[in-house]
Image (spheres, rainbow, N blue to C red):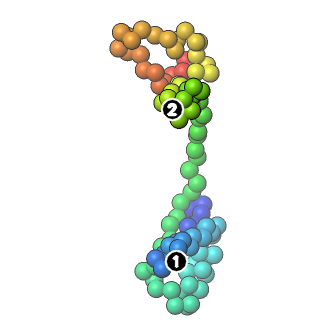
Amino acid sequence: MSDKFVLVVSDEKDDKHGEIAVLDSPNETERLVETLLEAGIDQERIRVLAGSEAKLLTTDRPVVGFIDKANPTTELEPVEAGSGNSRSVSSLFRSARDDTFDPVLSASEAAS
């Protein structure tokens, strides 16, 4: 069976538009749904989702912004650099004529 259960009770009159509960077992989830129904919550407002937590991999990418000190209201467009930690500096400066150069490499391509 699934690792977690997410119970959602919608309420469009509420500023938060409802409530969410994350439960560990089907028995716990069943008891909470029964309690909500006995309290008069309409069954159409109750949703139960079952699933497990997804593994997530994130990487950081530096963003550089240039500011003109002579004219503080002018901000030049930020330049996003590729994740160049594992690449040589010379690989970042290629000819504009090189059609195959992709300035944004994935982490696996940059590591090779």
- The structure residue drawn at horizontal position 55% and vertical position 81%, both measured from the top left corner, is 33
The secondary structure type at the circle numbered 2 is: loop
Pointer 1: what residue?
A: 14
* Label 1 crowd bin: few (<14), some (14–19), many (20+), radius 10 Å: few
Q: Is residue 78 visible?
A: no
Q: Which numbered tag is attached to residue 74?
A: 2
- The structure residue drawn at horizontal position 53% and vertical position 25%, both measured from the top left corner, is 82
Q: Earlier in the sequence, mark 1 or mark 2?
A: 1
Question: How many numbered discs, if any?
Answer: 2
Name the amino acid, label 2: Thr
Classify residue 96 by image quadrant.
top left
Q: Looking at the picture, does residue 57 appear above or below residue 109?
A: below
- The structure residue drawn at horizontal position 54% and vertical position 71%, both measured from the top left corner, is 16
**C-alpha gap between disc 1 and disc 2:** 42 Å
Spot occupied by residue 58 in the image (x, y as percentages of width and height): 58, 39
In the foreground, 24 or 71? 71
Q: Looking at the picture, does residue 61 appear above or below residue 19?
A: above
Spot occupied by residue 14 in the image (x, y as percentages of width and height): 52, 77
Q: Quadrant of the C terminus?
A: top right
In the foreground, 29 or 97? 97
* Label 2 crowd bin: few (<14), some (14–19), many (20+), radius 10 Å: few
Q: Is residue 39 visible?
A: yes
In the foreground, 110 or 11? 11
25 vs 16, left or right, is right
Name the amino acid, label 1: Asp
2 vs 96, left or right, is right
Q: Quadrant of the N terminus?
A: bottom right
Q: Looking at the picture, does residue 86 appear above or below residue 6?
A: above
